[in-house]
Amino acid sequence: MPKHIAKTAAPSQRMLRVAEEVRHALSSVFARGDLRDPELADARVTVTEVRASPDLKHMTVFVSRLGATADKALLDLLRRNQLELRRQVARTVRLKFAPELHFQADTALDHAMHIDALMRRPEVARDLGPREASLGEPDMEQDDQTP
């Protein structure tokens, strides 16, 4: 097994499985509200994705508020409570080392909404309209020209 894994390499099955277990563990912690910090217990946090490093010692946790992007205050609150969250993950997910959690705002929903708004613009709809119609049915003029 190579000691150095390229940054462009796809995550292994083990990395994906462990990251998903950590996501489930964090989601259940936030759902139950088993937190010492009352501010964090009241915050509606959604864990959308977790990405694991190849050595499983670092996990990047993508979070958002319920229906909105996580703001700086929420990320600061999560970073302040990182040790407690790490401890609770270590109790649930059996690993040799408790992973260090790095929190980031999940902007995928914002990006998807932006792309959707772009696709609904009149100039884009105009460009897409005739092409979609021509893809659906064969052109009758070409059939008439064949001998």
Image (tube, rainbow, N blue to C red):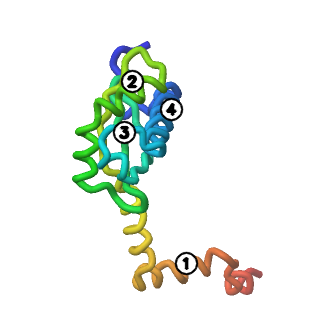
Q: Of the numbered discs in the image, which one, if any, rests on residue 131?
A: 1
> Image height check: is 82 above or below 145?
above
Tell which tag, 4 or 3, sits nearer the viewer.
3
- Label 2, residues with CA under 10 Å away: few <14, some 14-19, many ≥20: some
| Circle 4 SS class | helix
**Sequence-first disc among 1 and 4:** 4
Residue denoted by label 4: 21
Distance from the alpha carbon under mark 4 to that under mark 3: 19 Å
Distance from the alpha carbon under mark 3 to that under mark 2: 24 Å
> Closest to the observer: 112 or 62?
62
For the residues bearing labels 4 and 3, Cβ distance under 8 angstroms: no
- Label 3, residues with CA under 10 Å away: few <14, some 14-19, many ≥20: some
Distance from the alpha carbon under mark 4 to that under mark 2: 12 Å
The amino acid at mark 4 is: Glu
Check the picture and name the quadrant holding the N terminus: top left
Q: Which residue is rendered at x = 37% and y = 68% of the image?
A: 114
Q: Of the numbered discs in the image, which one, if any, rests on residue 35?
A: 3
Camera sees residue 6:
no
Residue 77 placement, left or right of 144: left
Where residue 12 sits: x, y (%)? 48, 27
| Circle 2 SS class | loop
Residue denoted by label 2: 56
